[in-house]
């Protein structure tokens, strides 16, 4: 079951139309445009709702994505590197989102820091090909994973807050 808040978030994320992956040349360019438009809208919505929590960028081909995501817990900002590759069978196969800095710190993660999304997210993704894209992977995959795992890792002392060093020159 999807709660009302999730339903509202999803209704504000543009759906994609082009069923194309990196091997589809011209169609991939069209899909990539749709991905960027959807991500831009999702980030704008998050900012308007005071829920800004990630930044993403890609390589020139749109096949490798990287950036930062963060989680606020007890008014402290915990920031993590994020990375993933677009599978060659995309969009039929969802990307495997990785937080390499948390590799090995939770059972809900695979080698290389890839977060576990198999039980809940991947079946939902499969039912929504090609309409779901990267913004949906963030909203329905990484976001809920962070909301569950980060407070648990903090409470167990597995991760701790680190202040950023101010211009140390």
Image (spheres, helix red, strand yellow):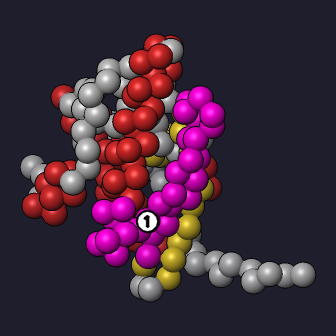
Q: Is residue 88 visible from the viewing direction of this image?
A: no
Of the 4 image quadrants, the one containing the C terminus is bottom right
Q: Is 53 in the magenta?
A: yes
Q: Is 70 in the magenta?
A: yes
Instruction: Give me the residue at 49% from left, 66% from top.
Output: 70
Instruction: Give me the residue at 47% from left, 25% from top.
Output: 29
Question: Residue 57: percent from the left, percent from the top?
Answer: 56, 47
Whether residue 130 is situated above or below residue 76 in the rendered picture: above
Whether residue 48 is situated above or below residue 6 in the rendered picture: below
Of residue 72 and residue 53, the one placed in the foreground of this image is 53
Left or right for 163, reference 74: right
The picture quadrant where one finds residue 85 is top right
Of residue 60 and residue 161, the one placed in the foreground of this image is 60
Instruction: Give me the residue at 34% from left, 54% from top.
Output: 41
Instruction: Give me the residue at 37% from left, 69% from top.
Output: 47
Residue bearing mark 1: 53
Whether residue 69 is situated above or below residue 51 in the rendered picture: above
Whether residue 6 is situated above or below residue 23 in the rendered picture: below
Crowdedness near tag 1: few (<14), some (14–19) or many (≥20) residues, C-alpha within 10 Å: some
Question: Residue 35: percent from the left, percent from the top?
Answer: 40, 38
Left or right for 18, reference 97: left
Q: Which residues are magenta?
A: 44-72
Helix, strand, or loop for circle 1?
loop
Figure label count: 1
């Amino acid at each position: 079951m999807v709660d009302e808040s999730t339903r509202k978030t999803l209704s504000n994320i543009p759906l994609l139309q082009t069923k194309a992956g990196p091997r589809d040349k011209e169609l991939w360019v069209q899909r990539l445009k749709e991905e960027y438009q959807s991500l831009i809208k999702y980030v704008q919505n998050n900012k308007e709702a005071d829920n800004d929590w990630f930044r993403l960028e890609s390589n020139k081909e749109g096949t490798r994505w990287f950036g930062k995501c963060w989680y606020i817990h007890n008014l402290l900002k915990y920031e993590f590197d994020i990375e993933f590759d677009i599978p060659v069978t995309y969009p039929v196969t969802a990307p495997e989102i990785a937080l390499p800095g948390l590799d090995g710190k939770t059972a809900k993660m695979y080698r290389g820091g890839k977060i576990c999304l198999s039980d809940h997210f991947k079946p939902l993704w499969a039912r929504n090909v090609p309409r779901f894209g990267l913004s949906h992977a963030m909203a329905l995959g990484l976001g809920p994973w962070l909301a569950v795992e980060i407070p648990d890792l903090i409470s167990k002392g597995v991760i701790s807050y680190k202040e950023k060093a101010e211009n140390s020159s």
